Amino acid sequence: MCDNRGRNYQNIMKASRRGFLKSSALAAAALAIPSSLASVIGSGVAEAAGMTTLKATHGAGLCNLGIFLAKERNLAAEDNVELDFVVTPTTTDVVTLFGAGMVDISVIPYSNFITLVDQGAPVKLVAGAGVEGCIFIGGEGIEKPTDLKGKSIGTFQADTLEVLPYDYLTKAGMSFADVDVKYFNSSPELAAGFINGAIDGVSHIEPYATQCLTERKGSQILTDGLDLYGKGYSDCVLAARTPLLEENPDAVKAVIKAMMKAQLQSEQDLASALADTVGIYYKTSLEALTLAQSRQPVMIDQRLNTNFFKERAKSMQAMGYVKNPLPDDAVDWTLLEAVIAENSDLYGDLKLKTA
């Protein structure tokens, strides 16, 4: 399960959640990189033969499809930028490397971004990545909030997938004190925990949520976030290190443009987009991936979610993960808007966008 094996929400609260987080990988503003990750870390931005290479981390959900396509199809090459993915063992390590400044950009859950900002990491949210697709699922016999009392829920700590069940229970007048929250390390591990009956409920991302629904009989969706947040709510975002934004904003613009191209390609030929990424990034069948993608499309222009990020930061304050509201300058759409202005035809062809 999690690298703090045997620890759940209640135990962590007793140990002082803020103290726990400050000593964990989430306190990435002052991190010591684990020796297990040292071998995957090189220098930061690299330039050779006119090409700028940006090191990047990413997650495992369909919200990463845009950056996966940008990488696999070299969509930033025309702007002399290429992506170098740093593969990490766990979800936490993605945030660790980015927060510590060992990679330049990252597609991460908005919740991890909020935590990094609160810890003082020099990072900014510069574009969206994927929307919707956060699914809270109950096992057999669990159909409403009260059915969860005394039951176990699996999720990732300080993640969008923990915020979702928190908000779901809060809306029903319940809290995490009514359930047993268990934390996992990776998407496949979390899905397997639910499918094998180790937990009663699971909060997961696509395509793993669909896998959970199809492989555990009697399971059903408790919320897909739409009833809580509305259509187009964010899951993952593109964030960049402030030093990179100051030193080479054009490289970041190239990535945003590449991800916008990837969105258009996924909208125009989804089958090809999924075929190019299944097996490499998604450990599931093409059929399951296709079904899951309908619940979590790529959406790079997420300016409509500016207030959503602030509201979810309030949820994370209530959960004890962050101390402060999300600062206004943490979300900076300047480069996104420049890309939109410079590529009006590309932007005009996109189906999902704010404007």
Image: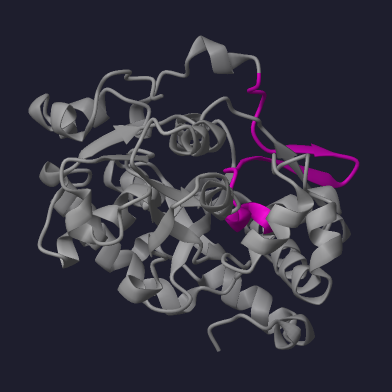
Q: Where is residue 248 in the image (x, y as percent from the top left)?
A: 64, 53
Q: Is residue 196 visible?
A: yes
Q: Position of residue 234 (x, y in %)?
A: 46, 66
Image quadrant assignment for residue 331: bottom left
**What quarter of the picture does the N terminus occupy?**
top left
- Answer whether residue 64 is magenta in the image: yes
**What quarter of the picture does the C terminus occupy?**
bottom right
Depicted 338 relative to depicted 204: above or below:
below
- Answer whether residue 327 is magenta in the image: no
Q: In this view, does 166 lie to the left or right of 236?
A: left
Residue at 48% of width from left, 32% of height from top? 196
Residue at 41% of width from left, 73% of height from top? 305
Q: Which of 110 and 177 is in front in this view?
A: 177
Q: Where is residue 246 in the image (x, y as percent from the top left)?
A: 54, 53
Q: In this view, does 326 lie to the left or right of 241?
A: left
Depicted 146 relative to depicted 180: above or below:
below
Depicted 334 relative to depicted 87: above or below:
below
Q: In this view, does 8 lie to the left or right of 289?
A: left
Q: Nearer the viewer, residue 26 or 176?
A: 176
Q: Residue furthest right?
A: 49
Residue at 17% of width from left, 57% of height from top? 146
Q: Nearer the viewer, residue 187 or 216?
A: 216
Depicted 234 relative to depicted 10: above or below:
below
Q: Give the range drawn in magenta.
A: 40-65
